[in-house]
Amino acid sequence: MAREAEAAGAALGSFLKDFPSALGPAEPLPWSGAGSGALSEAEAPGALSELARNLLCGSRGVPPLLAASLIHAAVDEVLQTDLTEFKKENVEGQGEGDEERFTLLDGESLQRCFFNSLRDVCSEWQKQLPPLAPLKRFLLVSIHAIRNARRKMEDRHVILPEFNQLFGLADGIDRAYFAVFDGHGGVDAANYSATHLHVNVGLHEEIVKNPAEALKCSFLKTDEMFLLKAKRERLRSGTTGVSALIVGNKLHIAWLGDSQVMLVQQGNAVTLMEPHKPEREDEKARIEALGGCVTFMDCWRVNGTLAVSRAIGDVCQKPYISGDADGDSFDLTGSEDYLLLACDGFFDAIKPCEVVDLVLDHLMQTKGVGLKAAERLVAAAKENGSNDNITVLVVFLRDPQDILADCLRDTKSREAGGDPQSSPFNFLSCEAAATQ
């Protein structure tokens, strides 16, 4: 803990050295002005948090626990002020049969106020650093993402083991959040979801008592928020998404579209969800009941366009493309090896049963070092013919060296006992699994 406190003190000192006083009205903001336009009050927490995370963790190398805690304190301080002073304009938009009216805030002046609050918090904490409690649960994350053969990279991902610190949750229960978003028709919806979805989860009134409900409902709220932005800025993009929220010994998942999450437990691939595709009978019936259609044009598509039936965004295809997520919850017993979240660019090329062998082969080659496991999986998907953007996020729930040691030990036991089926790490081929 002394080392962490020393690193935190150094980070705070460096920040205050570079920013010795509050920013004046004419001084430039310390981050790109790309996000300084108008935004709604609902968008403020996510937008400010994202700017600060990029500055603190990306540019300045501030320890993640400290950065998340600083951001929470500064955002909370700003949100408790009277935001009417930042009001920029009222916007009226004509929806389908109803009028929508909302207030936009001036992004630049709000960001200046936020940065000065962040600086004030740094100054206070340099004198007395509050406790920064890390997760008690073991977590190791491996992430890899490539544009591949596509012209643009439209995938985004979020890794947030500092969930508690970012939202000021101090009840002693471990929480960590992970998500993958696969954009289409542009990157706006994926960027927006990666900025706002976890904030909507963390600020949801049920986050402590009913985290599964908070996670699932936040997809729809994020969709509604983005649709308002899409209407006022004439955006047409959409994104699928899958998220996982670990709360104590429970795993909560929610998803829209064909990005997926799977679990590997004692060497066995466990299916956790069914992706939203137009050819699913329930999805096809829902779309047709709304007056839409599902047609085959190189693959099954909604109204001849999108190959997914649920997503955030896609304003021109609502309500056929639903923003209402599905979700599920599972107990974590300690026997789980890892979670894997990925977009369809991965799962269209790699079967879940192949994941297990690929990861174990990688751990064998690296002697139990799992940091580049996602890179190995992405390479395998590309080798199998995927031309799409590929994002793979592996969350090890046990030390990869322990996973490898269990595999090797069980292999020796199997060989000694002459029983080829005795080990939980005796994996069926995909062909064999399909026949059972």
Image: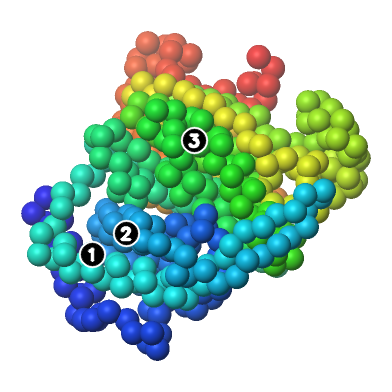
Q: Mark 3 points at which residue?
A: 214
Q: Is mark 3 on a helix, strand or loop?
A: helix
The residue lying at 56 percent from left, 37 percent from top is 217
**The C terminus is located in which quarter?**
top right
On the question of residue 401 being in view, the answer is no
Q: Do the residues labelled 1 and 3 touch (CB within 8 Å)?
A: no
Relative placement, left or right, of 222 versus 277 is left
Q: How far apart are marks 3 and 2 (CA)?
A: 23 Å
Residue 77 marker: 2
Mark in front: 3 vs 2: 2
The residue lying at 81 percent from left, 50 percent from top is 96
Mark 2 is surrounded, within 10 Å at the Cα level, by few (under 14), some (14 to 19) or many (20 or more) other residues, namely some
Q: How far apart are marks 1 and 3 (CA)?
A: 29 Å
The residue lying at 42 percent from left, 21 percent from top is 331
Q: Which of 203 and 3 is in front in this view?
A: 203
Q: Nearer the viewer, residue 89 or 254?
A: 89
Residue 299, image x, y percentages: 84, 43
The residue type indicated by label 1 comes to Val
Q: Nearer the viewer, residue 169 or 413?
A: 169
Residue 382, image x, y percentages: 63, 52
Q: Name the residue under label 1.
A: 121
The residue type indicated by label 2 comes to Glu
